[in-house]
Image: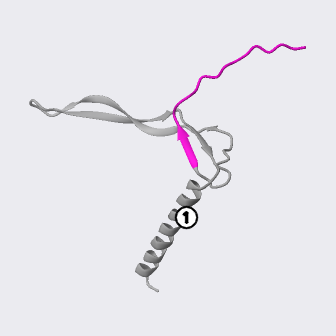
Amino acid sequence: MNHKSEIERLKKELNENEINQRLLEQNCNHKWMLTKYDPEEYKKPVFSHYEGHGSDPNPVYNYYSATKDRWSRECEHCGKKEYTYEKAPVKYEPKFNG
């Protein structure tokens, strides 16, 4: 078996597995595990200066690593993972001992 036919076989197998996973996630009665803090890393652009002359100079940016608050949860049954950037307010009530 040559490499090209092996690659095609693996692509077909991957496609079938992705379809099966999608069907499993759609038909699952999700049981979510505990939510966990899972920050997203991204490159933050910071303006540096303009380059070039004339009426249309090009802006130059420096990029720095930054994180954005994000939470995730995963289903115990099918493995589906969901992400959110939103937070809901939590109500605190006074607790009396006794």
Q: Is residue 96 left or right of residue 19?
A: right
Residue type at the position of mark 1: Asn
The prevailing secondary structure element of the residues shown in magenta is loop
Give x and y (percent) for residue 95.
Answer: 80, 15
Q: Residue at x 49, y 34 (%)?
A: 67
Give the total of numbered labels: 1
Give x and y (percent) for residue 43.
Answer: 41, 38
Is residue 28 placed above or below 51 in the rendered structure?
Answer: below
Give the quadrant of residue 49. top left
Is residue 19 placed above or below 67 in the rendered structure?
Answer: below
Magenta stretch: includes residue 94: yes
Q: Quadrant of the C terminus?
A: top right
Spot the residue most to the right: 98
Give x and y (percent) for residue 60.
Answer: 26, 34
Q: Residue at x 62, y 47 (%)?
A: 74
Q: Which residues are magenta?
A: 81-98
| Residue in front for this viewpoint, 55 or 14 | 14
Q: Is residue 92 left or right of residue 46?
A: right
Magenta stretch: includes residue 92: yes
Spot the residue most to the bottom: 1
Question: Regarding mark 1 in the picture, which secondary structure is present there?
Answer: helix
